[in-house]
Image (spheres, rainbow, N blue to C red):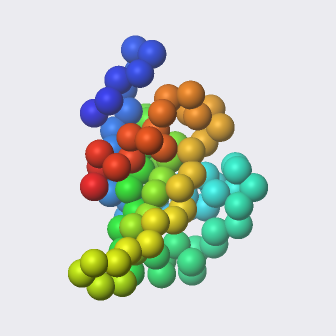
Amino acid sequence: MRTHKDQSIDCVTLSYEDIPALIALSTSVGWDYDEHEIRTIIKSGKIYGYKREGKVVSSAAIIPYDASLASIGMVIVHEAYREWGLGKLLHKCV
């Protein structure tokens, strides 16, 4: 758990249950991830993110291709949390 501005925030592995929140996060920044795309990413790799009060406020996906190659995508931080440094901190979730 990380605390910022006297508020706690948790880094977690996101799951199929978080798909509606990930779609909302994507939409909030003008991106258009849909349920099918997010399901494919979860099935192929992992999506990490920070939650605050149960709400997904950032995400980053890691999709492995083999033992020495992976792709990073879906790096999104909700506008209200951009000064918190969550994009930079996501590597600590892995």
Q: Percent from the top left, x then y, of residue 81? A: 56, 33
Nearer to the camera, 79 or 20: 79
Say left or right for 66 vs 74. left
Whether residue 54 can be seen here: no
- Residue at the extreme bottom of the image, as rendered: 66
- Residue at the extreme left of the image, as rendered: 67
Q: Percent from the top left, x then y, of residue 68? A: 28, 78
Total labels: the figure holds 0
Image quadrant occupied by the C terminus: bottom left
Residue at image coords 70%, 49%: 28
Q: Quarter of the image holding residue 21?
A: bottom right
Say left or right for 14 vs 76. left
- Residue at the extreme front of the image, as rendered: 68
Residue at image coords 48%, 53%: 59
Residue at image coords 48%, 81%: 40
Whether residue 11 can be seen here: yes
Q: Percent from the top left, x then y, of residue 37? A: 57, 78
Above or below, 38 against 84 in this view is below
Above or below, 8 against 61 in this view is above
- Residue at the extreme right of the image, as rendered: 30
Residue at image coords 29%, 45%: 92
